[in-house]
Image (cartoon, grey):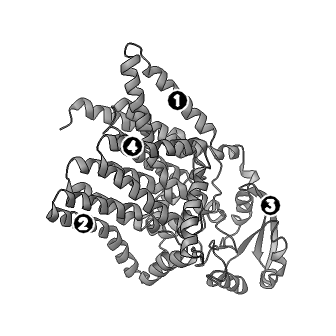
Amino acid sequence: MKNRFEIRKDYLALCLFIAISAIVLFFCSKNSPFYVFNDWVDANAFFTMGKGMMNGLVPYKDLFEQKGPILYFIYGIGYLLDNDGFTGIYILEVLSSTILCYCLYKLSKLMICPLYSFFATLLTFVVISSSTSFVQGGSAEEFVLPLIAFSLYSFFLLIQEENNKYIFLNGLVAGIVTLIKFNLLGFWFAWMAVYFFYLVSKRKYKYSIQACLVFLSGMIIPILIFAIYFMINGALLDFINSYFLFNVTAYTTEISLAERLTNTISAFFIQLNYNLDVKVSTIISFLSLFYLIYCKRVWEVIFLVFSFLLLMFGIYFGGLPFIYYYLCFTPYIIFGCIVLFKIYSYLKERFFSKIPVDYLVFLVVACFMVYNIQDSSNLEYSNVGKSDLAQFEFKKIIDREEDKTLLNYDNLDGGFYTTCNIVPNVKYFMRQNVDYKRYPEIIDSQNQYIAEGETNFVIIREYFGNFGYRNQLDNLNKNYELVDVVEQEYEHMDFVYYLYQRR
């Protein structure tokens, strides 16, 4: 049993993690009030889906997007907190990051003292939040991070002491991840598989089977809940086709198995090199495996290696590496930080036992955090105002009309549904990031919407590669008239946004 002093230290650490998460994400996430708007297409697509969900629309049946329903539910909660912006998502990010930090803190505390665990967690968290793979904030991977951290912690805990509660909770977590982004499930397959063989190695054959059943019982709960939800709304086939089958087929490239393996490894190392601090801390974390072996934590090492590899193949095997994919690997950085503080602790006891060097370490950690925060790629957008964004310029026009129906034509969700607080009245409210040949129904349906005048407004975005293509859309020019044009930069590219209104 924990004594009261230990409980108080954990409670203090939790409170500090809330405050630190709020401060770090205030600058590192474009969902925070520090930024006028998060124009990242993915975040806006999730927000639109969550908003639709909270307004009675059913994902995949009434609105089409390809991520998991729990991610939309998270964004739906964010929508309830802030209807036309991302402050609600920022609050949920702070909550998510607090859980991430607390789990990393509890994990590292199994190997180093609470103070150094706190420092190690801060270093890990700021590297994660300021990394390139963090993108603008609010990715599916970001909301999976605390689940990965919890499972890392609970595996190390279970090796020390059997506990069905943690097995069940990890099954529950696996079920949640299934409904956020199922290609990340390799991590939890490794989690249960390694723990199963660990129990077998201890000749606990009966309990090893029981553990698998407990894990599966937890995993089935969220899946069953959402299956019932989709069945009640007559959308179970839509869910299966749009979430599972679409993701398996639409985002994979047609290459050989050998090329897939090569591309998987290549993509990982390319993204590893995006940030120097991520690269260095990841390398140190790999080296920390030797320390764990030295400590006779062989099963923990097997789990870390196996889970890392399965996560890597689950993420990159499809052949299309997006910049935010690497974020899922960042919780492993904690092990490198643990070893660094182990080394520091040894040196302190041997050479600096009478000198209060911990104050200096605190100063170094604080300086590192400040440096990394100001190194966040999102800070360059801190001076952008509402007048600089088409999302707010078009809002002025759209808000004057009683009929605010809108179609985001042939592009990913640009955030116009968000700023105008519009629930789409068409299923294919945006284009997915797939070729027309792979899924022609999206653009074909959008062309039909324009031909039939389904929405009062249509927004089109052009760039250097397709300037003038809007003039070739006969039904658009026949049924709609151009009412506003805004030039705008997005992710270091120049775009022109056109707002059309029904004649």
Pick whichever of labels 2 and 1 is earlier in the sequence. 2
Q: Position of residue 391 (x, y in %)?
A: 70, 60
Eye-nearest disc, 4 or 1: 4
Q: Which residue is mark 1?
A: 366
Relative to 454, 188 lies left or right: left
**What amino acid is labelled 3 in the image?**
Val
Q: Amino acid at mark 1?
A: Ala
Q: Which residue is mark 3?
A: 486
Image: 494 above or below 365: below
Residue denoted by label 4: 290
**Dot 3: within a 10 Å radius of its alpha carbon, few (fewer than 14), some, or many (20 or more) residues?**
some
Residue 216 coordinates in the image, percent (x, y): 27, 68
Q: Secondary structure at mark 1?
A: helix
> Is residue 284 rendered to the left or right of residue 165?
right
Compute the Cα span from label 2 to label 1.
Answer: 43 Å
Q: Nearer the viewer, residue 319 or 29?
A: 319
Dot 2 amino acid type: Cys
Q: How many marks?
A: 4
Q: Quadrant of the C terminus?
A: bottom right
